[in-house]
Amino acid sequence: MRLTRLFTLAPLFWRISAQDVSVAAVKQAFIDADIPSDLKINFDPSFLLEVILPQSSGHPILVHTGIQLPRNETATPPVFGLFDPFDPANPSINAGQGPFVIAAVDPDAPTPTNTSNAQVRHFLGGDFFPRKLAGSSLSPLLSNTTAALSEWKQPTPTGGNHRYVFLAFNQPVGFNQQQFINATTPIMHFDIATFAQEVGLGNPIAGTFMMVANPDNP
Ligand SMILES: *[C@@H]1O[C@H](CO)[C@@H](O)[C@H](O)[C@H]1NC(C)=O
Ligand SMILES: *[C@@H]1O[C@H](CO)[C@@H](O)[C@H](O)[C@H]1NC(C)=O
Ligand SMILES: *[C@@H]1O[C@H](CO)[C@@H](O)[C@H](O)[C@H]1NC(C)=O
Ligand SMILES: *[C@@H]1O[C@H](CO)[C@@H](O)[C@H](O)[C@H]1NC(C)=O
């Protein structure tokens, strides 16, 4: 079955029990957290986005939708995976074989009740492809072939409990020529829906989110 296969393919998948398994449950969790309305996105995913946070020591953390994490477990740039929950017999995702664009945004900056800095762009990168395995098969884990437009920025919630939303898109032709965002573009006041429209990303094909709070200013 799929989880067994993932486990053999990817030793990173240690906390298998935490993995999202239902697209419908992820969609509902987004609705319950007001994410589609706050981000002004149409979130009707077809695939599951796995976000894996490597740790400086110990097993990596597998984000399941809505997980609450301490900030100190979010320091290292995530590893991403994308797969089709309806096609467990298929060792690759069925979304096409990439490339994909992945974005991570915080709509709760500086706080969930004062979003005047939102969205903060915590990651934006393209050219994510399924990793090639021995032979011609593909892993659901993704690797990227070009530098991120915005490198991973560790969550730094100043106050309250923030949503950190990860979205995957099919990458449109010409994405690498886009002129809207580069490494020097301020990360505040980003708008993923506007960016998606500007570069033709369409609707997200998958997503997940985690919660990170500031224990000193809850
Ligand atoms: C993070 O901080 C908590 C205490 O707040 C501690 O228990 C945990 O070991 C820390 N984890 C890491 C990866 O530093
Ligand atoms: C909202 O946050 C901004 C940025 O930190 C701050 O300048 C502003 O005073 C805050 N507004 C309110 C009503 O607290
Ligand atoms: C892939 O993305 C990471 C961030 O997750 C970035 O640090 C790295 O430079 C990118 N890889 C390549 C080959 O540019
Ligand atoms: C980054 O984008 C800004 C604003 O669009 C532009 O002025 C700047 O030249 C760009 N930098 C690079 C390295 O492309």
Image (cartoon, rainbow, N blue to C red):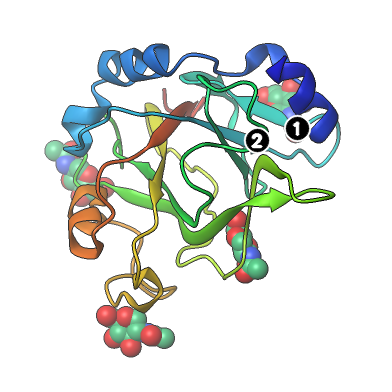
210 shown above or below 133: above
**Residue beneath the point at 34% across and 19% down:** 27
Q: Which residue is identified by label 1? A: 60
Regarding residue 114, the answer to whether it shows in the image is no
Amino acid tagged 2: Ile
**Residue beneath the point at 22% across and 38% down:** 39
| Residue 195: x %, y % from top left | 24, 58
- Disc 2 under 8 Å from ligand 3? The reply is no
68 shown above or below 156: above
Q: Earlier in the sequence, mark 2 or mark 1?
A: 2
**Label placed on residue 52:** 2
| Residue 138: x %, y % from top left | 69, 45
* Proximity of marks 2 and 1: CB atoms separated by less than 8 Å: yes
Q: Quadrant of the C terminus?
A: top left
The quarter of the displayed image where residue 207 is located: top left
Residue 43 or 148: which is nearer the viewer? Answer: 43
